[in-house]
Image: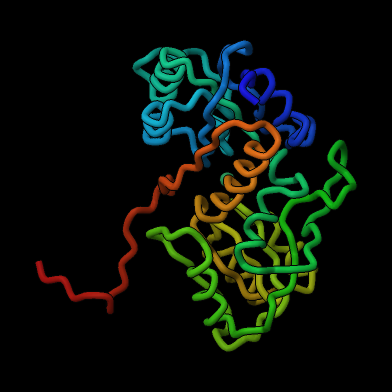
Amino acid sequence: MTDCTVRTLVDALDSRYPRDWAESWDRVGLVLGEFDAPVTRVLCVVDCVPETVEQALDAGADLIVAHHPLFLKPVSSIAPDTFKGALVHRLIRAGVALYTAHTNADVANPGVSDALAARLELTGLRPLAPAEGAAAGGGRGLGRIGTLPAPMTLARFARFAAGRLPVTAAGVRAAGDPDRLIGTVAVCGGAGDSFLAVAARSGADAYLCADLRHHPVSEHLAAGGPALLDVAHWASERPWLDDVAAWLRADHGVEVLVSDLDTDPWTVHANRDDLEIRP
Ligand SMILES: [Zn+2]
C-alpha cells in the first residue's frame, strides 16, 4: 500500500491499541503530526528523546511510534529552549508525526509483556493481572505468566534472560536463592513494583520486571514470594517494538524500522571483581 497517511496509521494503531484501554493517568495516541501527510517509513522506539528523533530524521521516517508518552503532565509552554519543546519543534519542522501507545499496549493481547515473555520462551501465557474496565476480556491484562521449556536454577535463568534480552549496561540482577528451581515465570514490561503482591499470589517461581527497589524486594522475599529479576526498563519493552513493526509491515505495507538505540539511562555497570582500576 502506498497511500498510507498519518490518519490511516493512527486509525489502525488506535484500533489495535484502543485509547480507552490506557490507564486514566496515561496520555496516548497522536502527539503531533498532520493527519493527511503521507507515510512511507515508520520508526518504532521505546522513548522519544533527541537521539531517537535524530535517528528518525536520518532514516527519513514520516512517523515515530513510541511506547513512552512525550508529555505525561500538562505543560504551559513548548518553547524551543525546553527539552521537550525542542523535540516538538524539530519533529514538526521535519514533518515527522509522533504517536504513543503506552499502557493501552501493555494491556493488549498481544501486548508489551507478550513480546517480553516470547524472548524468554515462555508458553501457556495468561495475564498476570487480568484487565478490568474497557479492556476487560480477550486474554488482556498487565504482565504475563507462563512456563519455561525446562526448569532451571535462578542463577541460570538470570544468565538465560541476559542472553535473550537486548544488551544493556544494567544487565540482569536476580534476588533470591541462586539454586532455587524456576519453572513458572511471571513477567511485566516496564516498572513492575506494583505487581509484586500479584506475582506472589500467582504461583510463579520467579517474577521478572524493571525498576525494582531495595525495600519492596527485601520485604517480598522475606514474605516467601517468588525470586525476582530486575532488568533494564528499555530492555523489557524493546521486544514489543518488533511485534508492532511486523504488524505494521504486514497490514499496512509501510517500511518499518525498529530503534535499537538503548535509551535506558544507565550507561555503566561495574563490579569490583571485573577489573582493578588504579587511580
Ligand atoms: Zn515503560
Q: Height in image: 100 above or below 224?
A: above
Q: Quadrant of residue 192?
A: bottom right
| Residue that lies at the very extreme toward the left in this rendered image | 279
Q: Height in image: 20 above or below 113?
A: above
- Residue at x-position 69% and y-position 41%: 105
Give the number of marks.
0
- Residue at x-position 58% and y-position 48%: 242
Residue 46, percent across and down? Answer: 52, 41
Is 207 positioned to the left or the right of 40 in the image? right
Is 204 positioned to the left or the right of 81 in the image? right
- Residue at x-position 67% and y-position 83%: 151
Residue 21, percent across and down? Answer: 78, 36
| Viewer-closest of 116 and 11 | 11
Q: Height in image: 183 above or below 122?
A: below
Q: Height in image: 74 above or below 13?
A: above
| Residue that lies at the very extreme toward the front in this rendered image | 1
